[in-house]
Amino acid sequence: MDETQVSVEIPVKAVEEVETNGKLDSCMKYVAASRRSKKGLFSAPFLARVNGKSATLQSEEGFKGHGMLAPFTAGSLSTDVHPLLIDKSEGSYVYDINGKKYLDALAGLWCTALGGNELRLVEAATRQLNTLPFYHSFWNRTTRPSLDLAKDLLETFTARKMAKVFFTNSGSEANDTQVKLVWYYNNALARPEKKKFIARKKSYHGSTLISASLSGLPALHQKFDLPAPFVYHTDCPHYWRYHQPGETEEEFSTRLANNLENLILKEGPDTIAAFIAEPVMGAGGVIPPPATYFDKIQAVVKKYDILFIADEVICAFGRLGYMYGCDKYNIKPDLVSVAKALSSAYMPIGAVLVSPKIADVIHSQSSKLGSFSHGFTYSGHPVACAVAIEALKIYKERKIVEQVKSIAPQFQDGIRAFSDSPIIGEIRGTGLILATEFTDNKSPNDLFPPEWGVGAYFGAECEKQGMLVRVAGDTIMMSPPFIITPSEVDELISIYGKALKATEERVKELKSLQ
């Protein structure tokens, strides 16, 4: 599942100061001078390039203006700035084409759980490529890896019994499929009006037409004529930002559950088909649920016979220190979406886990119609399945979930030690996923001016120091590989601290100019 990224731009003055301080060679100065936009702003990734001693700028005939329409990237960025070209991966690190080494603190896009050079996954893919590089799963034809992986997944998910697995190529496709399955299910039960979906503001569920509609991030809707009219969005469960004065987490959760119930009653319970949620919200800012939230939300949807879909694309297979986020938060879903760490991102693959009551209805209805007419050419691709099978074996054999649970306190506590910084509003997370939100005066309401690009400046400083993080506005996010070592966590914390100090100085300087 691809993630939305808010592009934040940095004042030209920031780059001019870099030039004045002599941190750019003559070629870099030329590029910096020639690439200023009409608004007098530089994009954050460009600042990262010019700040780094091993910046990835190539010659003028290099990679600017390349032929790829890049996902979640402004067109001007592709045209005016050389991309950061990653050439090699090794454990928790990646290397650019100039050989500069970066600690990959986002695990690619929350996904390279086993790091960048797990030989067993490469060998699993190679064996399958040498045996059967492709066959489909249509018309009761399939492959052994597809069936074996379905069996393994059903065994790994223990929050409640699941009956069937449908394979996709991504988390976006998995959540897109969820909508079709739910509609198919309700049509089969002669409930043609029960078609609406409720998701949450700031959620991320993918970028296809349907999954982007489910997502609660405005950037995914803008100019795409989305969201689709059958999707509604209820409150984001971000306690720090949205709680009322004196309201406890439990009271906040009660209020949100009441708001959800009121939305259901307003639209009509007989029209609401499903509720979808990430156990921990990922791309929307790493937002763990407040206390008692899922208990209360599940009670509401169960009351009105509304299906619960758990989007485990980021959380599953150990990210939170549990095999699934549902295990951590006692979620009993009717449907589950997985992807990303399913193959440690070595091959594109996603899946939908289907509960017995839904699987039985699909079985009966498809038998009446003569076919279940949904699927993809690459559903259950044998190579992707072979890699995923091996990944699941590794998670089990190496006790990866326990490993994450063991190292998570070092990661969480190490970053939270910076909480007193005057530019940090909140540090939040659990397991090996964490976000830092930059605000003034420790308040969710005192935001820094967008043109200051505080989050982007921090991200650029991290890149300069040899670490890659996710920047979304003035929030930065990290989700390192599950196999990160204690010494690598120390390195991550050290770079974070250096970047934070530089960003504090930058904010202090900008304030002095007001």
Image (cartoon, helix red, strand yellow):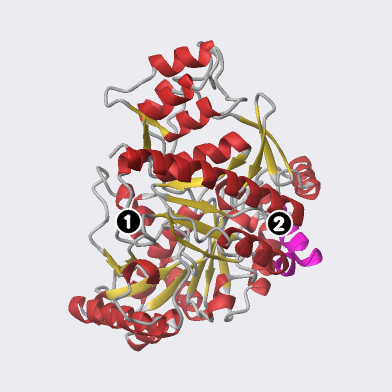
Can you tell which mark lies on residue 213?
A: 1
Is 390 left or right of 247, judged from the image as shown? right
Toward the front, the furthest residue is: 512
Label 1, residues with CA under 10 Å away: few <14, some 14-19, many ≥20: many
Residue 114 visible in the shown view: no
The local secondary structure at tag 2 comes to helix
First in sequence, mark 2 or 1: give its number: 2
Mark 2 → mark 1, Cα distance in angstroms: 33 Å
Highlighted magenta segment, given as a residue range: 386-403
- Coordinates of residue 185 in the picture (x, y in percent): 39, 73
Query: Which residue is tagged 2?
Result: 145
Q: Compared with residue 61, is residue 22 higher up or lower down, i.e. above or below?
A: below
- Coordinates of residue 149 in the picture (x, y in percent): 68, 62
Question: Which residue appears at 65% of the width and 48% of the height?
Answer: 494
Q: In which quarter of the image is residue 53?
A: top right
The local secondary structure at tag 1 comes to helix
Is 98 left or right of 359, judged from the image as shown? right
Label 2, residues with CA under 10 Å away: few <14, some 14-19, many ≥20: many
